[in-house]
């Protein structure tokens, strides 16, 4: 909770600070796209490390490193050109997160087996959603009242505390022999992961390809579009944007709770209707903008739609993660999940850059962008039907 809260408050504040300083959605979209690249690239490497190194040590080391990065950023702020500095820090933060998550996911099968695995994933998602709920809520108040510096202080303290606490966690670990060099081990392990995905379970690779397309049009819109619509189109305050992000995270918390409650009823073969429902809430949000509803009314319609979409997306994510963990040999879990995450995330940087450019080029028609994304995402969900049936 502490580590993810620090991550959430920084993820909220840094892109918002860039938008406030430059007033350029295209630049924010480009910065967010560049930030996602190291996350996608380092996830497979993080998976290899997670399967071979004590996972507790990985998490503690990365949290210590993040705390040090925030200190360096605080010193450089105001002394170094803002745009390249922010882009570099965001890239490093997302890269660390890309290496961190495989260690968390690879720990779960060691701590919870069989029927407990899906509820365990639900708990992890609830923790993540709770942190994401608190991060923007607190971040909006701090940023609106005192700017970026207090957020850096809170984030740095969170990572430092989390790193110290992680030193006392016990996660089972069996050292694996290594007769080759580090680079050769990484290449061999990644080859094993992709061989498993492409030859032993190729249907997983097909499903992830469809998820890439879904991320391109839906996930990227929520990262860039929500910020631009609330801050620029509706002209709302930082506190209101923080509230919208908190509601988005509350939807994730609700989805995690639902996943825990209906764990035994979820069927991965029925994933495509769930994906279609994820896209459906975009429609009322787009219509609110099209009809020119009052600003506050539009805000609440969009916030409610974001809540519903995040709840359904989290429910789907928990289901897919538990399925992959159960279908993958334990020696490959970290690497396979990292590879799947990296491939599924590849589309997000392109989508973020695309939406940043669209919102800057068509500032008077945000409704068209939102409704277009809903239509395309719904179509992708329908096309995924065969792939999900093959998983059953």
Image: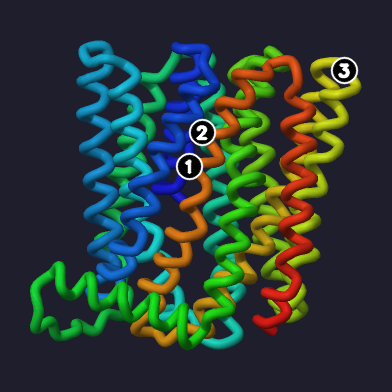
Residue 174: mark in rendering: none
> Is the residue under label 2 in contact with that under label 3 (CB below 8 Å)?
no
Q: Position of residue 139 (x, y in %)?
A: 51, 28
Q: Residue at horizontal 87%, vertical 30%?
A: 287
Q: Which residue is mark 2?
A: 353
Camera-nearest residue between 261 and 11 = 11
Camera-nearest residue between 235 and 129 = 235
Camera-nearest residue between 167 and 94 = 94
Classify mark 2: helix, strand or loop.
Answer: helix
Crowd around label 1: few <14 · some 14–19 · many ≥20 (10 Å): many
The colour scheme used here is rainbow
Q: Which residue is mark 3?
A: 292
> Is the residue under label 3 in contact with that under label 1 (CB below 8 Å)?
no
Crowd around label 3: few <14 · some 14–19 · many ≥20 (10 Å): few
> Is the residue under label 2 in contact with that under label 1 (CB below 8 Å)?
yes
Q: Which residue is mark 1?
A: 349
Q: Quadrant of the C terminus?
A: bottom right
Upstream in sequence: badge 1 or badge 3: 3
Q: Position of residue 297 (x, y in %)?
A: 85, 23
Q: CA distance from mark 3 to mark 2?
A: 26 Å
Upstream in sequence: badge 3 or badge 2: 3
Q: Position of residue 150 (x, y in %)?
A: 39, 22
Q: CA distance from mark 1 to mark 2?
A: 6 Å
- Relative height, residue 310 to residue 6 (above, below): below
Number of numbered tags placed on the structure image: 3
Q: Residue at horizontal 39%, vertical 84%?
A: 330
Q: Residue at horizontal 39%, vertical 48%?
A: 3
Classify mark 1: helix, strand or loop.
Answer: helix
Q: Report the side of 366 relative to 112 (left or right).
A: right
Crowd around label 2: few <14 · some 14–19 · many ≥20 (10 Å): many
């Amino acid at each position: 909770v502490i580590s993810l809260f620090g991550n959430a408050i920084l993820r909220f504040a840094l892109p918002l600070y860039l938008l406030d300083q430059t007033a350029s959605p295209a630049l924010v979209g480009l910065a967010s796209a560049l930030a996602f690249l190291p996350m996608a690239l380092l996830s497979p490497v993080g998976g290899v490390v997670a399967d071979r190194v004590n996972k507790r040590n990985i998490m503690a080391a990365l949290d210590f490193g993040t705390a040090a990065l925030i200190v360096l950023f605080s010193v450089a702020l105001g002394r170094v050109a803002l745009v390249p500095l922010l882009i570099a820090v965001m890239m490093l933060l997302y890269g660390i997160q890309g290496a961190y998550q495989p260690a968390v996911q690879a720990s779960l099968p060691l701590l919870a087996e069989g029927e407990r695995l899906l509820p365990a994933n639900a708990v992890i998602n609830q923790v993540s959603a709770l942190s994401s709920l608190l991060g923007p809520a607190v971040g909006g108040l701090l940023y609106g009242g005192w700017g970026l510096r207090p957020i850096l202080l809170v984030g740095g303290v969170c990572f430092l505390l989390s790193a110290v606490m992680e030193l006392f966690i016990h996660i089972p670990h069996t050292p694996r022999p290594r007769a080759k060099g580090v680079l050769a081990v990484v290449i061999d392990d990644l080859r094993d992961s992709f061989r498993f995905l492409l030859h032993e379970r190729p249907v997983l690779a097909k499903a992830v390809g469809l998820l890439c397309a879904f991320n391109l049009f839906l996930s990227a819109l929520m990262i860039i579009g929500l910020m631009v619509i609330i801050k620029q189109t509706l002209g709302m305050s930082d506190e209101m944007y923080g509230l919208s992000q908190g509601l988005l995270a509350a939807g994730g918390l609700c989805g995690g709770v639902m996943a825990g409650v209906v764990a035994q009823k979820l069927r991965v073969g029925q994933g495509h209707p769930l994906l279609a429902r994820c896209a459906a809430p975009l429609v009322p949000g787009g219509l609110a903008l099209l009809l020119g509803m009052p600003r506050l009314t539009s805000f609440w319609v969009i916030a409610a739609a974001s809540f519903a979409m995040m709840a359904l997306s989290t429910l789907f994510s928990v289901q897919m993660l538990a399925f992959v963990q159960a279908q993958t040999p334990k020696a490959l879990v970290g690497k396979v999940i990292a590879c799947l995450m990296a491939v599924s995330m590849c589309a997000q940087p392109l989508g973020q850059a695309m939406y940043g450019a669209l919102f800057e080029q068509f500032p008077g028609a945000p409704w068209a962008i939102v409704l277009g994304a809903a239509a395309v995402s719904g179509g992708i969900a329908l096309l995924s039907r065969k792939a999900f049936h093959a998983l059953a």
